[in-house]
């Protein structure tokens, strides 16, 4: 036998709009110290309904932009991320706020999300937070173990390997980051974080 189950179709889309510049993670807001400001937006569109939705896209009236991704079909619970780069050249009270919405088709009927916005604020004297953190670990060379804060050995002479994990907790990218440890006469090469 075969069973047919009727489902009351409830198509629904949500959108989460966020912004970043070349140094930031995506967030709902951003502060910049330069104008014009080149930024990147991302739009996370999710099907929170109980039926599939086709022709999913994003429209941002302020940017004058409609997504050009083709054939986006989202099953219930699935999401898709759209991105758009934009250069902000004009500000209102030192802010640039724009709103986006998502849409699609389900059973030949249009489906629209609520709107979501992202705010970019211009402050000429803005000084971003600068912060690095470091975690130093050690392990005996050749040992089948994970690095830890300390090791214990019964050997008078032992070779150890040190691990330095550096995290950029700043609001901007940092260049020429290095590790220096005078106790083992070590200075790393430089990296950008």
Image (cartoon, rainbow, N blue to C red):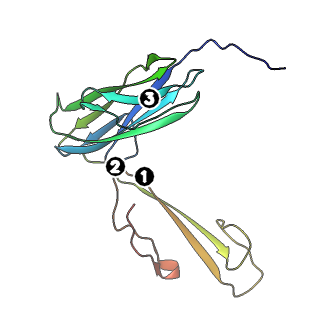
Can you give x and y, in whole percent of width and height, for residue 166 in the image?
A: 48, 62
Q: Are marks 2 and 1 in contact (CB under 8 Å)?
A: yes
Q: CA distance from mark 2 to mark 1?
A: 8 Å
Under circle 1, the secondary element is: loop
Q: CA distance from mark 3 to mark 2?
A: 42 Å
Residue nearer the viewer, 139 or 31: 31
Residue 137 as seen in the image, left or right of residue 65: right
Tell me the residue at 44%/24% (across/down): 104
- Above or below: residue 148 compared with residue 171: below
Residue 29 as seen in the image, left or right of residue 96: right
Please identify the quarter of the rendering in which residue 151 is found: bottom right
- Which residue does the numbered mark 3 point to in the structure image? 55
Label whose residue precedes the other's in the sequence (3 or 1): 3
- Which residue does the numbered mark 1 point to in the structure image? 169
Under circle 3, the secondary element is: strand
Tell me the residue at 51%/25% (across/down): 53
Q: CA distance from mark 3 to mark 1?
A: 39 Å
Task: Characterize the local packing of mark 2: few (<14), some (14-19) or many (20 or more) Cα atoms within 10 angstroms.
Answer: few
- Above or below: residue 110 compared with residue 97: above
Can you give x and y, in whole percent of width and height, for residue 82 in the image?
A: 40, 38
Question: What label sits on residue 129 in the rendered view?
Answer: 2
Under circle 2, the secondary element is: loop
Question: What label sits on residue 79 in the rendered view?
Answer: none
State the quadrant of the C terminus. bottom left
Mark nearer the viewer, 3 or 1: 3
């Amino acid at each position: 036998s075969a069973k047919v189950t009727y489902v009351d179709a409830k198509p629904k889309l949500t959108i989460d709009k966020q912004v970043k510049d070349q140094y930031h993670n995506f967030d709902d807001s951003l502060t910049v110290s330069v104008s014009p400001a080149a930024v990147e937006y991302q739009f996370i569109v999710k099907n929170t309904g109980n039926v599939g939705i086709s022709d999913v896209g994003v429209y941002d009236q302020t940017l004058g932009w409609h997504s050009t991704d083709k054939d986006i079909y989202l099953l219930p619970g699935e999401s898709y991320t759209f991105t758009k780069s934009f250069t902000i050249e004009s500000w209102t009270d030192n802010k640039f706020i724009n709103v986006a919405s998502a849409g699609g088709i389900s059973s030949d009927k249009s489906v629209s999300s609520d709107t979501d916005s992202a705010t970019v604020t211009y402050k000429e004297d803005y000084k971003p937070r600068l912060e690095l953190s470091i975690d130093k670990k050690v392990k005996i060379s050749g040992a089948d173990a994970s690095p830890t804060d300390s090791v214990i050995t019964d050997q008078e002479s032992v070779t150890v390997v040190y691990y330095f994990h550096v995290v950029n907790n700043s609001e901007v990218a940092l260049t020429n980051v290095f590790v220096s440890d005078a106790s083992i006469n070590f200075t790393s090469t430089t990296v950008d974080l």
